[in-house]
Amino acid sequence: TQRLWEQLGHHDLIMQAAWPLWQDKYLVRDEIEWVIQVNGKVRGSCSTAVNVTEEALRSTAQAQPNIQKYLSDKPIRKVIVVQKKLINFVI
């Protein structure tokens, strides 16, 4: 480990180096992965921003090619959204 530490350009001993500082900015999520279901069966997934509106989420989910084939000729009766987890289209 000391040799790798020296190859990174450090001249002191690794055991004398300070621990990295905690930074909250690296723990904040910018995107969420949503599971997309049609009639309760998982058919795909999509990523959106954390603060996406329900309308934007619905349009993003419907735009997925795998989801379009299930929703193409059938009317959507209900859309169920579980916040930050999944969206379910009931047809």
Image (cartoon, rainbow, N blue to C red):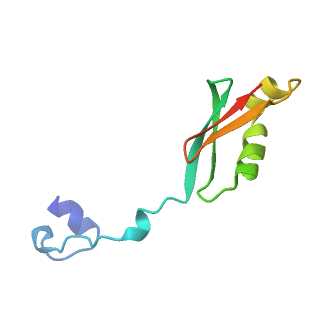
Residue under the point 75% across and 52% down: 56
Counting labels gives 0
**The quarter of the displayed image where residue 58 is located:** top right
Q: Is residue 4 left or right of residue 66?
A: left
- The one nearer the camera, 61 or 76, is 76
Near-viewer residue (20 or 45): 45
Where is residue 16, by image quadrant? bottom left
The residue at the point 41 percent across, 62 percent down is 27
Up the image or down, 24 lies above or below 90; here it is: below
Tell whether 40 sits left or right of 12: right
Picture coordinates of residue 18, whole percent (x, y): 18, 74
Q: Is residue 38 above or below residue 61?
A: above
The single residue placed furthest to the front in the displayed view is 78
Residue drawn 42% across the image and 65% down it:
26
For the point 72% across and 31% down, which residue is it?
89
Q: Is residue 48 above or below residue 88?
A: below
Q: Position of residue 21 (x, y in %)?
A: 27, 73
Q: Position of residue 53 (x, y in %)?
A: 70, 55
Q: Position of residue 69 (x, y in %)?
A: 80, 25
Q: Quadrant of residue 41?
A: top right
Residue 78 appears left or right of 72: left
Q: Where 41 falls versus 12 (above or below)? A: above
Quadrant containing the N terminus is bottom left
| Residue situated in front as seen by the camera: 50 or 90 | 90
Q: Quadrant of the C terminus?
A: top right
Left or right: where 24 falls relative to 71 = left
